[in-house]
DNA sequence: TGTGCAATGTAACATACGTTATTGAAATCA
DNA sequence: TGATTTCAATAACGTATGTTACATTGCACA
């Protein structure tokens, strides 16, 4: 519905000027598309055109092997950008599909060119987004390589929780949670059956309350401990810190 | 001992002007450091300063859990850059260690600022490097989540092989290969014992000849098949394609 | 307001991979 | 050149997780 989540997230990290706000606002209201749940937005092999900004809804990035084995490699939540500058590459190496109904703003190459030339604070913010996404992907590598099923699941839930919180999507101690056990299986590299067992165990330990499409976490610290979760890789620790742009911004006066 | 590998790699993708070459050349000869094998260059928790360009030798990026479990999340080969613009982040979320003796050029924040302002072709090349590294990390997620031990190992060897080839480090059908079975275990999420079993199997199938610190691959296509290896994620398919910079380069006349 | 299909839950059984232990071969170094 | 350590190889055994199968619940839509 809005780009509030994106701006909220980026501003955690970089102070954006009114001009920056206007730029982002315009870009994210110009070309909007709506998708139903469980459809592909982008398919592996396609030529990348626009960069997608998730305005509302959940989506994921996934890859498939020839024989059908499938791995979810990232989740996209409101405010997330699917690969700044992808259009530099000749073809997509993965697909992007929706989980819920999703609204997307298409950001053009020209938009990024203009930003690169004129709005260094936004450039910094986009680099931050890119670096954090890379860090998340590394942490998934860690999870899949070293964490047990229980730790992996707890860790994933913590990550999603904190990202939702940053986007302003946690109410009290609960949130919308549209992922099926099948989705969780594809993301954790576990079988559906074992995902079920693992969720039962988390429930039995009182770490989560997951019912229907709602997740509640009564005690985040306990869930973190169960997942050996160290939030440093999300680089959210910037409260109060107002970082300057990479280069001197031409519109500095406006800030 | 030179930046040949980096330039060779970047030029696969973006045509760099003589000015660009000069810029990269100066940056990579100004501040060089040498490290012995098996030492840390950067530690998790530190404040990132410079960006590191590997001039020679092999290194890896790794993360550790409180209890010591360790995951190698990337390998760095000559010509690789460890995280363009990391200094945007407040602290490192991983460590970087050497495998062999390594020479590193430290690239300063000021260097990246200058490049951002004045050398758009290099900016594009750095974005390409960043996007490919992200794609590699996703593929590792895929490997750890879905591939069997044998597939995983074959896949990793294919990837390293192609990256070495791009850097100009394959001689005939063999290359230097300084990774121990312990390194491979930490990278694939397997135990050392099972890495050994898996290598034996690859040997028995005639897919690799691995002896001492030398790896030979008699038939790359067969190894690729064994690893369900699809090279698209490396985005090397740019032969002859001379992409323009993201924005109009100020030094276009020089190219 | 059923009816059908997807999602969840559980049980029984199978296996790929981990663990521990031991040995020999190579490097590394005094 | 022997002493010391690291690395590779292999065996015996254990287990976390996968597979198959089927029952149950819940929700979309007729």
Image: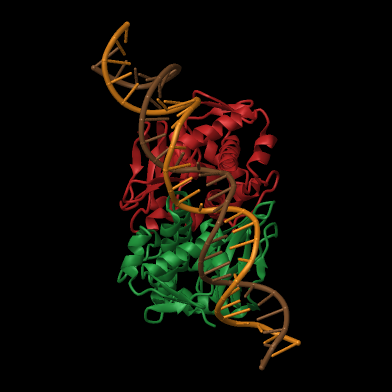
Chain colours: A green, B red, C brown, D orange
Q: Nearer the viewer, residue A48 or A34?
A: A34
* Residue D30: quarter of image: bottom right
Q: Nearer the viewer, residue B106 or B144?
A: B144
- Image spot of residue A252 (x, y percent): 40, 72
Measuring 53% from the left and 64% from the top, which residue is drawn there? A184
- Image spot of residue B128 (x, y percent): 57, 52
* Residue A12: quarter of image: bottom left
Number of numbered labels in the structure image: 0
Q: Nearer the viewer, residue A249 or B181?
A: B181
Q: Nearer the viewer, residue D7 or B1?
A: D7
Measuring 50% from the left and 55% from the top, which residue is drawn there? B118
- Image spot of residue A166 (x, y percent): 41, 73
Above or below, comparing residue A248 to residue B161 in the picture = below
Above or below, comparing residue B77 to residue D18 in the picture = above
Measuring 45% from the left and 40% from the top, which residue is drawn there? B191
Residue B155 in sight from this viewpoint: yes
User: Is residue C8 shown left or right of residue A147?
Assistant: right
- Image spot of residue D24 (x, y percent): 57, 76
Above or below, comparing residue A220 to residue B250 in the picture = below
User: Is residue A45 shown left or right of residue B198?
Assistant: right
Residue A16 in sight from this viewpoint: no
């Amino acid at each position: 519905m809005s780009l509030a989540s994106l701006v909220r997230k980026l501003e955690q990290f970089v102070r954006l000027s009114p001009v920056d706000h206007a730029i982002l606002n315009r870009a994210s209201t110009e070309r909007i598309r709506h998708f139903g749940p469980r459809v592909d937005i982008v398919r592996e092999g396609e030529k990348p055109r626009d960069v997608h900004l998730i305005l509302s809804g959940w989506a994921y990035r996934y890859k498939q092997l020839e024989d059908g084995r499938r791995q979810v490699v990232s989740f996209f939540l409101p405010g997330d950008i699917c690969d700044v500058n992808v259009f530099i590459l000749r073809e997509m190496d993965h697909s992007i599909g929706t989980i819920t109904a999703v609204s997307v703003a298409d950001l053009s190459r020209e938009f990024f060119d203009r930003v690169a030339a004129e709005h260094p604070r936004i450039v910094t913010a986009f680099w931050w987004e890119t670096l954090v996404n890379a860090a998340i992907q590394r942490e998934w590598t860690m999870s899949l390589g070293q964490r047990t099923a229980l730790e992996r699941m707890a860790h994933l839930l913590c990550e999603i929780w904190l990202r939702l919180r940053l986007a302003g999507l946690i109410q009290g101690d609960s949130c919308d949670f549209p992922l099926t056990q099948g989705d969780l299986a594809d993301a954790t590299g576990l079988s559906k059956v074992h995902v079920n067992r693992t969720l039962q165990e988390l429930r039995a330990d009182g770490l989560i309350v997951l019912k229907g499409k709602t997740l509640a976490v009564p005690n985040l610290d306990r869930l973190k401990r169960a997942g050996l979760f160290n939030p440093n890789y999300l680089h959210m620790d910037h409260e109060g810190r107002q970082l300057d742009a990479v280069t001197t911004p031409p519109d500095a006066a406006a800030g």
